[in-house]
């Protein structure tokens, strides 16, 4: 895997959600249940591509956490905003 590929994937909203969940639950990302058990990560990434206009918001439950993703790239877990890279 090249550095460019890693950059591309690390900018995906689905991986930002996983990172935020890992931080919020104090769990290593690789120990979390797969995101695809709750929401389709590829569909989430497509919905929040860089050319997405404002106003899009997706909310879903992941375990005991309420996850919200907004079109500006904001990811919040249980109301706490997690900054993206």
Image (cartoon, rainbow, N blue to C red):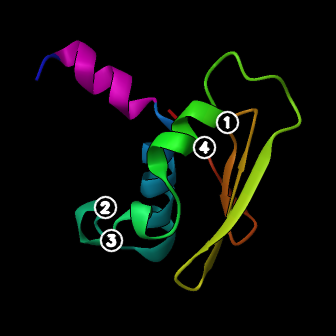
Whether residues under marks 3 and 2 lie with C-beta atoms below 8 angstroms apart, the answer is yes
Task: Give how far apart the Cα atoms at labels 1 and 2 are.
Answer: 19 Å
Are there few (<14), some (14-19), or many (20+) residues within 10 Å of tag 4? few
Residue 61: x, y in percent? 63, 74
Element under label 4?
loop
In the rendered image, which quarter contains the N terminus?
Answer: top left
Residue underneath mark 1: 73
Give whichever of 75, 51 is nearer the camera: 51
**Res. 29 mark:** 2
Residue underneath mark 3: 32
- The image quadrant of residue 51 is top right
Q: Which residues are magenta?
A: 3-11
Are there few (<14), some (14-19), or many (20+) residues within 10 Å of tag 3? some
Q: Main secondary structure of the magenta part?
A: helix
Q: Nearer the viewer, mark 4 or mark 3?
A: 3
Give whichever of 46, 20 is nearer the camera: 46
Residue 69: x, y in percent? 69, 50
Element under label 1?
loop
Task: Give how far apart the Cα atoms at labels 4 and 3 are.
Answer: 19 Å
Residue 34 is left or right of residue 67, and the answer is left
Residue drawn at 54 percent across, 42 percent down: 43
Task: Give how far apart the Cα atoms at labels 1 and 3 are.
Answer: 21 Å
Whether residues under marks 2 and 4 lie with C-beta atoms below 8 angstroms apart, the answer is no
Q: Nearer the viewer, mark 4 or mark 1?
A: 1
Q: Is residue 42 above or below residue 34?
A: above
Give whichever of 58, 27 is nearer the camera: 58
Q: Is residue 65 above or below residue 39?
A: below
């Amino acid at each position: 895997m090249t550095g460019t590929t890693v950059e591309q994937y690390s900018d995906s909203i689905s991986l930002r959600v996983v990172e935020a969940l890992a931080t919020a639950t104090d769990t290593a990302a690789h120990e979390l249940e797969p995101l695809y058990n709750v929401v389709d990560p590829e569909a989430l990434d497509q919905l929040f591509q860089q050319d997405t206009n404002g106003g899009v918001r997706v909310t879903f439950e992941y375990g005991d956490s309420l996850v919200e993703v907004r079109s500006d790239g904001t990811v919040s877990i249980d109301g706490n905003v997690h900054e993206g890279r």
